[in-house]
Image (spheres, rainbow, N blue to C red):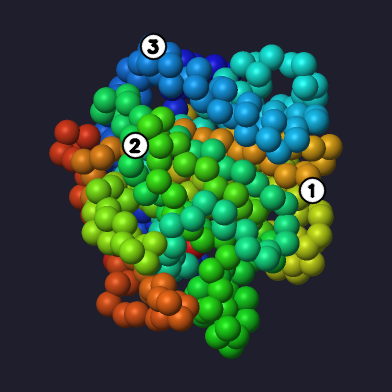
Amino acid sequence: MQLKQVLSLCLLGASLVSAHPGHEEKRASNELLAFKAHVRRGLSLCARSFDESGLNARAIARRAKLASEYQRRKLAIRDTDDVLNTTHLSSADYTTSTDETEIFSSTGTCVLNPEGETGPFWVSGELIRSDIIEDQAGVPVVLDIQFVDVSTCQAVEGLYIDTWSCNATGVYSGVSGNGNGNSADTSILEETFLRGIAKTDSDGVVSFNTLFPGHYSGRTTHHHIIAHLNATLLSNNTLTGGTVPHIGQLFWDQSLIDEVEATSPYSTNTVAQTTNAEDRVFSDETSGTTSDPVFNYVLLGDSVEDGLLGWATVAVDLTATYTPNYSFVYTSSGSEAVSGNSGSSGSAPSSGSSPSGGMGGGPGGF
């Protein structure tokens, strides 16, 4: 699917729900419909701008270079027509002689989510770094995520993008508590794996070296992202100040998840899997829309164990401001628990007819 086709269709409806069993916060349907209609109009106008500015051509070249650097030998590419269809993967084998424009031209993913799911596992104040694997085992992943301004269709330079995900066995670093591995093991507070922040370049792009996430009870495989606008870099390599115009989650094809989960150490996880089709956050971010918050990807070798390159385009409304909830803050001695920030709130621009609101009394989807 070409970029022009994708942008004329893709949008991500606002969602604000708790993924904890038995707790839900849903926006009024008329507000959602108004917001989605506004975003659809905005994104459809960006297609020609992306081509004329060369943003699309540079993205193709960048993705091809990344794949080459990771010794791509055989490729399998996804093309999603319906993100709620768990069998939607359409794959084909490519050789190194295949034209790179055929392989890398599709953005596939197009996301605009003014207030998504932060969850209780975000740690505020993480380090600025793009290689976040540390000593963790699993399928290596290079993420190439591009951020564009939905109002101007221009790449957003200088955004600090915060990402975090669980490890291969479903555990997050830097947080302790029920639902995150052994809640009695406080040594996890000293860990920082699979967490980091990187700054977008002139094309609005950040890249992370990370791992394919595992799974835990009640959630499908996913990555979290938060965008920080006008933040200040401190001497200790952390951020302060600024605003948050975007909170969201990105996903993978179910067939790819199943393939990865069959490999070690993912296969050692005895917790029952939740599929994309069963995941409420996935459903809320795609139902009633033509949104596709699923990474495009290529294999970097002959099997998933050799690694993946995944890419996505995220459209943000820079006039929106949100406050992500957190219960832990990164310090020089590890994460420390804090209180008084159990709710996420924010406001969206009035021109977008986007609903505003808070998370209520509990944390969001994790």
- Helix, strand or loop at mark 2: loop
Q: Is residue 3 left or right of residue 76?
A: left
CA–CA distance between discs 2 and 3? 18 Å
CA–CA distance between discs 1 and 3? 38 Å
At 52% from the left and 79% from the top, the residue drawn is: 189
Q: Are marks 2 and 3 in contact (CB under 8 Å)?
A: no
Instruction: Check disc 1 and give the amino acid type.
Output: Glu
Q: Are marks 1 and 3 in contact (CB under 8 Å)?
A: no
Disc sitting over residue 217 in the figure: none
Would you call the spot at circle 2 few (<14 residues within 10 Å), some (14-19), or many (20 or more)?
A: some
Q: From the viewer's perspective, is residue 158 above or below residue 127?
A: above
Q: Nearer the viewer, mark 2 or mark 3?
A: 2
Q: Position of residue 326 (x, y in %)?
A: 37, 69
Q: Is residue 119 visible?
A: no
- Mark 3 sits on what residue? 52
At 75% from the left and 69% from the top, the residue drawn is: 270
Q: Of label 1 and label 2, which has the lower sequence position?
A: 2
At 63% from the left and 81% from the top, the residue drawn is: 182
Disc sitting over residue 305 in the figure: 1
At 43% from the left and 57% from the top, the residue drawn is: 128
Q: Are marks 1 and 2 in contact (CB under 8 Å)?
A: no
Q: Residue furthest right?
A: 302
Q: Position of residue 242 (x, y in %)?
A: 24, 54
